[in-house]
Amino acid sequence: MPMTLRHALLGLLTERSASGYDLLKLFNTSLANVWPATQSQIYTELNRLAEAGLITVVAEGPRGRKQYALTDEGRAELRHWLTETEPQPVRRSEILLRVFFLGEIDRDQALAYLDGLAEMMGKEENALRELDEAIDWDDGNLSVYGRIAMEYGLRFNAMRREWAEWAADQIK
């Protein structure tokens, strides 16, 4: 089973309860390079998780604000997904598919495409560096393993930028 928004939300609720708004902020600061989600996707999935008994509402505040906590069933589902399912490799890349066919356009256009890729990857790398510096990392599990995931994103984007620069040099 591939990673789902369901498992991302269950994982974020392992250390403390949180509202949908809190979870959206956590997504933007901790899962930015791993699994993006919109506000509507998060709230829809929270309702599904509550209906399935994987999370529960532990408090309600003004304007319908709900605070969610992980149930034992939710923790069991997360652990099952972590230990008993195989992650699915990403096999499709629109970026590489385009690279494969760059011979169909003139050399200057191909170079412009590769230079654009290098720039895009550099921007993503810089954005992650800024996010990394803005996070107050602590000794909690989400920080320890989140920092490891952040490092993957930093290295991955650096590698893609370096590759795009190398690729442009190959056709100059």
Image (cartoon, helix red, strand yellow):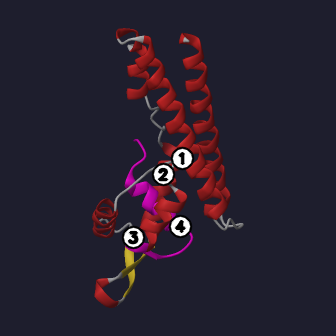
Dot 4 or dot 3: first in sequence order is 4
- Position of residue 83 measured from the top left corner of the image (x, y, whole percent): 54, 47
Q: Nearer the viewer, residue 96 or 130?
A: 130
Secondary structure at numbered mark 4 = loop
Q: Please name the residue that numbered disc 1 is placed on.
A: 83
The residue shown at (43%, 46%) is 3
Q: Is residue 92 visible?
A: no
Dot 1 or dot 4: first in sequence order is 4
Residue lying farthest front?
A: 108
Dots 1 and 2: beta carbons under 8 Å? yes
- Position of residue 156 measured from the top left corner of the image (x, y, whole percent): 59, 37
Q: CA distance from mark 2 to mark 4?
A: 14 Å
Q: CA distance from mark 1 to mark 2?
A: 5 Å
Secondary structure at numbered mark 2 = helix
* Part of the protein shown in magenta: 1-21
- The kind of residue on which mark 1 rests is Thr
Q: Please name the residue that numbered disc 4 is placed on.
A: 14
Q: Is residue 20 visible?
A: yes
Dots 4 and 3: beta carbons under 8 Å? no
Question: Could you say which quadrant of the image residue 61 lies in?
Answer: bottom left
The residue shown at (46%, 67%) is 25
Q: Nearer the viewer, residue 56 or 113?
A: 113
Is residue 121 left or right of 93 when viewed as pictured?
Answer: right
Residue lying farthest right?
A: 139
Q: Please name the residue that numbered disc 3 is placed on.
A: 55
Give the quarter of the figure containing the N terminus.
top left
Dots 1 and 4: beta carbons under 8 Å? no
Q: Is residue 9 magenta?
A: yes
Dot 1 or dot 3: first in sequence order is 3
Q: Which mark is residue 80?
A: 2
Dots 2 and 4: beta carbons under 8 Å? no
